[in-house]
Image: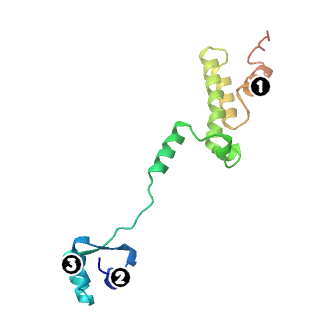
């Protein structure tokens, strides 16, 4: 096996890459070992005896697999968490979790004719304004205002 370090060095200059990325055809090593000038190396490059290897990238397959697992709900335990519970859910998500049950309660009460449309509209607007912490808080205020009878505790 001939020493091709000089040819590899010249090829790396011509190919504008490191010598480690220079590929030399093993079947044509003897022919390339006779190449001494840059022009000889250029000819070998044109003929395909010498090529520049592609840059080795970082595979995303493991990252894709991990992301798919996270989408299924894996890797969400306390050891994987960075940030407080409030920082892990957006303001909008927190708002939706709070407002949807309140609006469902109001809609149910109106459908069952337990509150008038005027009362419904008033409390809907107040809920939208963020006046009530929870469904229970809204229910309590409806009872205190006399719009609903207080439910007996068993």
Give the residue number, with chain letter if any, for mark 3.
Answer: 46
**Mark 2 or 1, which is nearer the eye?**
2
In this view, the residue farthest toward the top is 154
Question: Compared to 147, does 101 lie above or below?
Answer: below
Identify the mark nearer the N-term, 3 or 2. Answer: 2
Q: How crowded is mark 3: few (under 14 residues within 10 Å), some or many (20 or more)?
A: few
Q: Distance between the residues labelled 2 and 1?
A: 86 Å
Residue 5: image tag: 2
Question: Compared to 79, does 148 lie above or below?
Answer: above
> Which residue is found at the position 77% from the left and 23% from the top?
140
> Which residue is found at the position 63% from the left and 22% from the top?
117
Question: Compared to 96, does 56 lie above or below?
Answer: below
User: Residue 18: x, y in percent?
Assistant: 40, 78
User: Residue 58: x, y in percent?
Assistant: 45, 60
Question: Compared to 140, does 28 lie above or below?
Answer: below
Quadrant of the rendered image containing residue 96? top right
Q: Distance between the residues labelled 1 and 3?
A: 85 Å
**Mark 3 or 2, which is nearer the eye?**
2
Identify the mark nearer the N-term, 2 or 1. Answer: 2
Secondary element at tag 3: helix
Q: How far apart are marks 3 and 2 (CA)?
A: 19 Å
Residues marked 3 and 2 touching at CB (< 8 Å): no
Residue 67: image tag: none
Q: Residues within 10 Å of mark 2 (few under 14, many from 20)?
A: few
Q: In which quarter of the image is the C terminus?
A: top right
Give the residue number, with chain letter if any, for mark 1.
Answer: 141
**Mark 1 or 3, which is nearer the eye?**
3
């Amino acid at each position: 096996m001939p020493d091709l370090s000089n040819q590899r060095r010249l090829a790396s200059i011509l190919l504008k890459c490191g010598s480690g990325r220079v590929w030399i055809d093993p079947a044509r090593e003897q022919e390339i070992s006779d190449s001494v000038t840059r022009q000889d190396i250029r000819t070998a490059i044109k003929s395909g005896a010498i090529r520049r290897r592609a840059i080795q990238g970082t595979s995303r397959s493991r990252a894709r697999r991990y992301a798919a697992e996270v989408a299924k709900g894996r890797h969400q335990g306390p050891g994987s968490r960075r940030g407080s519970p409030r920082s892990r859910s957006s303001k909008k998500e927190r708002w939706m979790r709070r407002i949807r049950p309140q609006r469902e309660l109001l809609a149910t009460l109106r459908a069952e004719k337990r509150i008038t449309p005027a009362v419904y509209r008033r409390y809907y607007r107040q809920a939208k304004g963020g006046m009530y912490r929870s469904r229970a808080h809204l229910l309590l205020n409806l009872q205190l205002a006399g719009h609903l009878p207080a439910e007996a505790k068993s």
